[in-house]
Image (cartoon, rainbow, N blue to C red):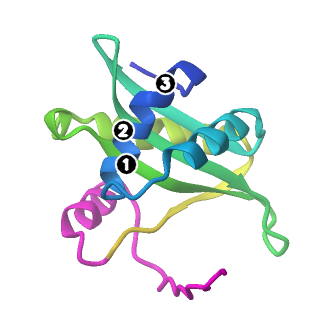
Amino acid sequence: MIRKVELKDLEEVFSLLNELYENKIEKDIFVEKYQRCLEDETFYGIVAVEESKVVGVLISRKINRLVKRKNTLFIDDLIVNEKYRNQKIGKMLIQNATNYAIQHDCEVVELTTYIPNEKACRFYERNGFEKRHYKFKKCIDVL
């Protein structure tokens, strides 16, 4: 079952996303941001639930770009618990987010992934995404 993320999902969502980010998420900051996101009208987070357990999560946000006629749904994060992969859960999360985008006046769904992550690249291509951009990143040292 796919449903919107709720406050009660915080621990399980944290666990999945922390896996995705190689245990580099600071929990206290995550908790604060998670609670704020639930109140943000541009936030769209969904979970896949099997037997009362969160086994997948997709975090996205609706972006209103100044030069575009319609909105963009940007997928920030997508992960499925390793034990539940290859069961079409990721595909269902993508389809749900795409339906949300259509219903909320978006013209495109975008995401980024690391180039060396070939499995993810193949997954996104199989689900209708195409490689279109390079993403550049500049790290800023904050004292």
- The residue closer to the viewer here, 13 or 92, is 13
**Mark 2 residue type:** Ser
Could you tell me which quadrant the N terminus lies in? top left
Q: Which residue lies furthest to the top in this view?
A: 51
**Mark 3 residue type:** Asp
Kindly indicate whether the residue at mark 2 contacts the one at mark 1 (C-beta within 8 angstroms).
Answer: yes
**Relative height, residue 70 to residue 93 (above, below):** below
Which structural element holds mark 1? helix
* Picture disc at residue 18: 1
Report x, y in % for residue 120: 27, 61
Characterize the magenta stretch by its predominant secondary structure.
Answer: loop
**Mark 1 residue type:** Asn
How crowded is the residue under tag 2: few (<14 C-alpha within 10 Å), some, or many (20+)? some
Give the left or right position of residue 35, taking residue 57 as reference: right
CA gap, disc 2 and disc 3: 10 Å
Could you tell me which quadrant the C terminus lies in? bottom right
The answer to whether residue 95 is magenta is no
